[in-house]
Amino acid sequence: MLLASVDYTRPATVPEALEALASREGAAPLAGGQSLVNVLKNRVASVELLVDISRLEELRSIEASEGSLEIGACVTYDEIDRSPEIRAGHEIVSRVASHIEDQQIRNRGTIGGNCCLSDPTNNLPPLLIALGATMNIQSGSGLRQVAADEFFRGYFLTAVEPGEILRSISIPALGEGAGAGYSTLSVASDSKAIVRAAALVRGNGTIDEARVALAVVGPVPIRHSGMEEALRGGAATADAAREAAEAIGEDLEPIADAHGSTEYRRQMARVVARRAVDEAIARGGENG
Amino acid sequence: MSAPSAPSAPSAETVVAPVEPGERLGKWSGKSVPRTEDRRLLKGQGEFTDDVWMHRQGYAHFARSPHGHAKILSIDTSRALSLDGVHAVLTGEEAKEMCEVPFFQIAPEPAGRLEEWPLAVDKVRYHGDAVAVVLAESRDVARDAAELVEVEYEPLPVVVDTVAAADPDAPLLHDEAGTNVAWHGVFDYGDIDWALENADHVVKIDRLHFHRFSSTPLECNAAVVNWDPGTGVVDVKSNNQMPMFASMVIGPTLGVASNKLQFASQDIGGAFGNKIGSYPQIAALALLSRKAGRPAKWTEYRQEHMLTAGHGNERTFLDIEVPVLKDGTILGFKVRAFDDAGAYLHYEPLGAVIWSQVTPGCYRLKHIQVDYTETLTNKCPTIPNRGYSRLQHLWLIERIVDTVARELDFDPVEVRKQNYVQPDDYPYETPSGCVYDSGDLPRSLEVALELIDVKGWRARQRELGTGSGKRIGIGIGSTLDSGTNNFGQARIINPDLPFSGNGEAAYVKLDLYGEINVDIGTTPQGQGHETTAGQVVADVLGVEPSAVNVSAGFDQRHNTYVAFSGTYASQFAVTGLGAVLGGAEMLRREIVTLAAFALEADEDEIEVEGGACHVRGDPERAIPFIGIANLAFSNNAVLTPELRERISLNCRYVYTPPFTVPDPETKTGELTLTYASQIHAAAVEIDEETGRLEILDYVAVDDCGRVINPQIVEGQVQGAAALGIGAALYEAFEYDADGLLQQSSFYDYHALTALDMPMMKYADIESPSPFTPNGAKGMGEGGGAPLSTLCSAIQDALGDGDALVADSHNPWFRIHELLGGGADGAPRAVRVESR
């Protein structure tokens, strides 16, 4: 498929980018283009002006301080995979990024693009929700912060308003006794996800805090408060995780497609959520 | 009770006569000579159709139906034509007016009355059906213009299930045919009623389903077509893999004689049968070129390829009954088969007979009745995809054998070994009169089981027990790749078709300075024809393979073709190399004649070696090929008149297999010449919670007779295994109730990648074919063994439960469902009646 005719500009600074984005109604930021360009080729969405932000240095840095991270929106998956800072404090972020599609895509695709496209099958959104990340959104009038679990609003829809861009993503330090886990069931290797889950568990033998995010079970990744509540205050064990996963049920109404029925996805959500929590508990133990 | 007698043996003259391969091949054949074509292909120096450029060419784009079935109320091309850079737009109605007759149909009446034109006329019959085609100055403009072709549709009811399509009340696709049944016939071999009455057990299976998928060539379809208004010649540069079939179908439709319809291709990026089906598009491009007065270039998009380039045959098997003796002898089976050909008959309904090349599979089954119906549905037309029509049937037989073993408590290995055609049975005549040429199936199976250490996996399976959340399954698939078709089998479909036999042409010559050149009528797509033809010629003419230039690709202007030319249906090693061998031997005889003349010796004293001829025992009396060429081409006054007349050093040879015409009444005959076998085995691990399957160990044991180039053969085995594994687990084309394709991009159609492929073990066994010039058998398609193997392994992993692996496609959710005992509320699909 070919792109429809589209204008292109590459501003030199973030303010210039914001100006370009505000200049036309059909303007959209282009980062790695690994999803957006496919969307445009398939003519699912139409864009009149592509504002290329991929080379803006302000969006390309990784800052680490005392275990917390700030990752620029235009940092690529490959850079996340290879970053010593991210590997040190948030190994799971590197690991998930390293499993996104293939090397060519990882060379170009960005964390900001992965989030802003808000495709429900994307890898990073459920993880960022589980980790309690904050999305830093820049507009002409300043910076505002939106929690990751408030950021995703619908299919291809996020909290980023016209005239704004996602500038960076802040991920808090895991902290002592905390661990994160991630589990995906996909059609094959290197392929579409059927269901995903990410989890963060904090505690020492007993779970003090649990965050469980599920994806591909609806238009946006969600936190599953039922399972989180079931975990909280309980023992940090596989049995507890298994029991808590039972909280996932009829409240979910995942789509049915060629890769699974609604009921299958619901059951699999339970499985991957439990596996993510199991991993989080195990890693939390190592981090105690 | 005694088993009934086998069908009477055919009379001696109907059995294919063995040929003596003797010493026709020498030191280069059988070696993994590095592929000649790789240097050019790996350096980006290949010439694919999209690389072809013609002066004044425009770019074509098809406007396609968004509906599964709809009436075309009107087409308005004015907006498309008003776009800057658009040369022409051609609609279905206009195309029809420019044509002489609809495409030739293979089907007998009533389906034979079906009218197909290069573009849809009056109505569209599947999602993606082409209604118009645009020619413009660039690909972008052509695509934009195609979106501006305004078509008013009135949606019609759709039928996407082959069994439902056969119902007389089903929505009708082709009014002129008056039925959706493309072909129906009963193949009745032996005496199935006798067998069912006299068997100790009858195993009954309600339904099995072989799903729809396709291969994924890296290069999609493409063509550049120029209708030259001056000469009337229509030049077709394309990647169609069976150009002479395409020519025979579209020539009469376009009103262009064969000698003015010129097909050519150089490199083709995979085809797998898909590229037999591009002739309607080529015909449309020819008309578009004629209308616009410019060459029309078309390079298919991947999505277009998935929607419209052709899918493999989907087949539903109903009411299967299998008579079995208490010692484990399987007598045969009875089945009603419904095959789904899609919306138009492209090469179909040949699939309705092609499966009968392997009627009993690998087994000595004597009593087989197949009630076969092929239907038209509102789906993409099928094409003869790799393993065409046989893999569906072979999968059925493997499911039958596994089910018999499981239900009657036989060891799946022993029941196979017992029922296999045995090594001393060859040449073995099947109930449908095909003659299996050679093989050793029991040994192939033993080798396979040893290579994956089946005993070790069985132990591991027991060890795991229950409660681990994992299951181990071990599976076997036994299939055949029948090669070198006898086109006479078309008469079983339609007795009026004047087709039979097969053949291929090669031109082998010395060039002006004694260089060796070979042209072949094949259209290689990765099979390494330049390499293997070079090996054969090097052996015959006593040179190194690098001294042989094999022309890249196909060109009708070389006059190296017959009606069957092309590359399809596992036959190159026999027909292509048979032609090359014959041509090289002709040339060698001419060289020897001239050498004897020049050296004043007898022909039987001449040795041909190292690019020269010498008199035996006297290396000083020698003449190099350059000298031979000089005599024939630029110094011929020194020759005798007789030699001048007889010797050209240009040797065209047509290989024809020794076939007779099959009998349409009894539906019997020698339908194919060779039978390569594939015995696969696998150990898999299934995650009980998700149904996810991981292949732990996989082996393919291949027997394709004499191997010309082992590395190329192994590559083909790997490729065929990859297709089968992908199809078994990931790849399916499914339509919703509105007739819309659910998997029209790689997001939803996961074509298997290297990451999904297990590290496959491989072994080959060589049982030379007694029927071919070189002992080789056609191979490359495989028989879909991984589909059988993985279904067998899943079934094994399920243990003693009720669930039957009844579908050839087993994504995780389906395996999960099987682990839970099958689909909710589904009745048990297998019954056994014993006496």
Image (cartoon, coloured by chain):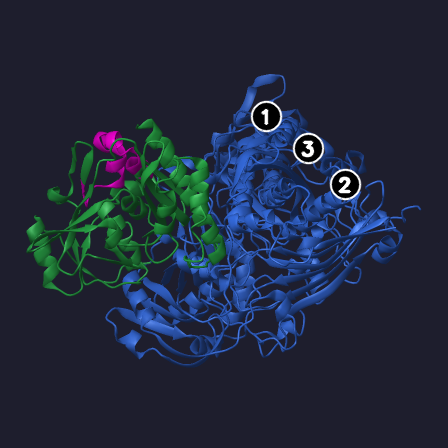
Chain colours: A green, B blue
Let me know if marks 1 and 2 both belong to one chain: yes
Q: Earlier in the sequence, mark 3 or mark 2?
A: 2
Residue B444 - label: 3
Q: Nearer the viewer, mark 1 or mark 2?
A: 2
Magenta range: A71-96
| Alpha-carbon span between mark 3 and mark 1 | 26 Å
Q: Earlier in the sequence, mark 1 or mark 2?
A: 1
| x then y, percent, for residue B427 | 78, 40
| Alpha-carbon span between mark 3 and mark 2 | 23 Å
Residue A91 among those drawn in magenta: yes
Observer-nearest residue: B293 or B84?
B84
Tell me if B432 is positioned left or right of B254 in this view. right
Seen in the picture, residue B476 relative to B173 is either above or below; the reply is above
Q: Which quadrant holds residue B170?
A: bottom right
Task: Identify the residue at horizontal 38%, vertical 60% (top origin).
Answer: B298
| x then y, percent, for residue B419 | 78, 40
Tell me if B582 is positioned left or right of A43 in this view. right
SS of the residue under disc 2: loop
Amino acid type, callout 2? Asp
SS of the residue under disc 3: helix
Residue B409 - label: 2
SS of the residue under disc 1: loop
Question: What is the chief secondary structure element of the magenta stretch?
Answer: helix
Amino acid type, callout 1? Lys
What residue is shown with label 1? B27
Tell me if A80 is positioned left or right of B793 in this view. left
Task: Identify the residue at horizontal 66%, vertical 43% (top origin).
Answer: B479
| x then y, percent, for residue A60 | 16, 41
Observer-nearest residue: B639 or B783?
B783
| x then y, percent, for residue B251 | 52, 66
Q: Nearer the viewer, mark 3 or mark 2?
A: 2
Amino acid type, callout 3? Ser
